[in-house]
Image (cartoon, rainbow, N blue to C red):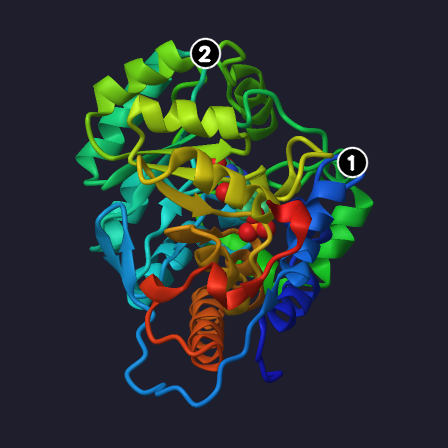
């Protein structure tokens, strides 16, 4: 077993151990992938200010997100088809999150269902909803999330139409994998992955199956779903969902100051500054570059979280220093899952927590609440 010291190590193992189709599904952005690349490279452009001769004993990384106590302000973002990276991937990730004391978000497009997660974990988790044309689906998903004790609804607003990802089209992405020569070879040289998949019965989109009337096989289920994203989603429809849910509401996919103001005025408990990890509007600015403007626009009307591009505890620190109350990670934990299953997600979270803690110490800070712009050297184009 190689020594794992950073998320990049997990990424390399993930690539080796997972069929190309599913690794590529994770590690890709839309069109030219400019936004996908800049999500990470823009973090590198923010530099940290070193502080010496300060007492660094008694440091704490804990905080709160939407009033929930968290061991560090890092939640697991919703990721579709997590259960194809490893069998029961959503359950494994949720368990690792519970152990680490951070929130887990289940995607609408997960392989395991809302009920599967509730059965295998004790901590309340967040449910991410895509608004579909079929209101019956939306209504029942909300009811199921409520019945499962979910503590927040994460409404994703930036995927009413799918951004094109070249790799997925070329690989013929489907679940289970389409049986082309390349995919069969890919599975054959990864017997551990194939055996795991054979051993699980949860290889369907279990939140959706049953709603796609008249649709039997999985690839038609995927096409049904792709046609279902409601292109007429507006604030009126969001209000209907808010009223029906009645609990904590987090709006995901905000990248514009006016949208952020509207979301705050609307009464969202939190917004997630996100470009969907560079998978939707290629050419948009990175989330971290948009963060200061959005923090300024909403003031303290709502909590601001950030995702897209976080690969280390240093990145978490930079987002918090620029005014985010919390962060979310997608690929950083999926690399852990694809590399080593539940243990890998635990490893990813440990790596990030340790990096955050050590970086806080070297910046002369003892708690996440004290982080601020004074910890950074900020390029002008971030303003
Ligand atoms: C996602 N993301 C996502 N978001 C969402 O609201 N529902 C979903 O089903 C998915 N599915 C999904 C699949 C994969 C493979 C990835 C990589 C991402 C977006 C996700 O929640 C988050 O915004 C990004 O992953 C954040 O970027 P990083 O951390 O991956 O750089």
Instruction: Report the front residue among 368 and 7.
Output: 368
The mark found on residue 70 in the picture is none
Which residue was labeled with disc 2? Answer: 133
Q: Badge 2 local density, few (<14 within 10 Å), some, or many (20+)?
A: some
Outermost residue toward the bottom? 53
Q: For the residue labelled by badge 2, is the local secondary structure a helix, a strand or a loop?
A: loop
Instruction: Report the front residue among 28 and 224.
Output: 28
Left or right: residue 311 versus residue 167 is left
Sequence-wise first label, 2 or 1: 2
The mark found on residue 166 in the picture is 1
Q: Position of residue 327 (x, y in %)?
A: 44, 53
Residue 374 seen from this side: yes
Instruction: Report the front residue among 294 and 276.
Output: 294
Which image quadrant shows ligand 1? top right
Q: Position of residue 314 (x, y in %)?
A: 53, 68
Q: Position of residue 38 (x, y in %)?
A: 71, 49
Residue at 36% x, 10% y: name it. 236
Distance (Cα) linking label 2 and label 1: 26 Å
Q: Badge 1 local density, few (<14 within 10 Å), some, or many (20+)?
A: some
| Residue labelled 1 has its Cβ within 8 Å of some atom of ligand 1 | no
Q: Position of residue 118 (x, y in %)?
A: 25, 46
Residue at 61% x, 28% y: name it. 219
Residue at 55% x, 26% y: name it. 159
Q: Quadrant of the C terminus?
A: top right
* Vertical arrangement, residue 49 with respect to residue 73, above or below: below
């Amino acid at each position: 077993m190689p020594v794992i010291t950073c998320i990049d190590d997990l990424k390399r193992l993930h690539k080796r151990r997972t069929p190309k189709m599913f690794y590529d599904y994770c590690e890709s952005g839309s069109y030219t992938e400019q936004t996908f690349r800049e999500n990470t490279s823009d973090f590198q452009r923010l530099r940290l200010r070193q502080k010496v001769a300060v007492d660094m004993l008694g440091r704490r990384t804990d905080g709160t997100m939407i009033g929930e106590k968290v061991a560090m302000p890092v939640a697991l973002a919703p990721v579709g088809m997590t259960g194809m990276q490893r069998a029961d991937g959503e359950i494994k990730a949720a368990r690792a999150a519970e152990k680490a004391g951070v929130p887990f978000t289940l995607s609408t497009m997960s392989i395991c269902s809302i009920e599967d997660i509730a059965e295998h974990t004790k901590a309340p988790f967040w449910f991410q909803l895509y608004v579909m044309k079929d209101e019956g689906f939306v209504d029942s998903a909300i009811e199921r999330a409520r019945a499962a004790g979910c503590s927040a609804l994460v409404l994703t607003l930036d995927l009413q139409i799918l951004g094109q990802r070249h790799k997925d089209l070329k690989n013929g992405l489907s679940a289970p994998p389409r049986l082309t020569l390349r995919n069969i070879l890919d599975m054959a040289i990864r017997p551990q992955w194939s055996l795991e998949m054979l051993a699980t019965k949860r290889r369907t989109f279990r939140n959706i199956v049953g709603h796609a009337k008249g649709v039997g096989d999985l690839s038609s289920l995927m096409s049904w779903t792709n046609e279902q994203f409601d292109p007429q989603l507006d604030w009126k429809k969001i209000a209907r969902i808010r009223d029906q849910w009645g609990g904590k509401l987090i709006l995901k996919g905000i990248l514009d100051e006016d949208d952020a103001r509207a979301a705050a005025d609307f009464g969202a408990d939190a917004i997630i500054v996100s470009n969907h990890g560079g998978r939707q509007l290629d050419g948009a600015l990175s989330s971290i570059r948009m963060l200061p403007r959005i923090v300024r626009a909403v003031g303290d009307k709502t909590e601001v979280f950030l995702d897209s591009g976080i690969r280390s505890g240093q990145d978490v620190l930079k987002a918090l220093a620029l005014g985010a109350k919390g962060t979310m990670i997608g690929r950083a934990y999926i690399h852990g899952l694809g590399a080593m299953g539940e243990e890998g997600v635990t490893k990813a979270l440990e790596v990030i927590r340790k990096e955050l803690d050590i970086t806080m110490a070297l910046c002369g800070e003892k708690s996440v609440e004290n982080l601020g712009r004074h910890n950074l050297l900020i390029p002008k184009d971030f303003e």
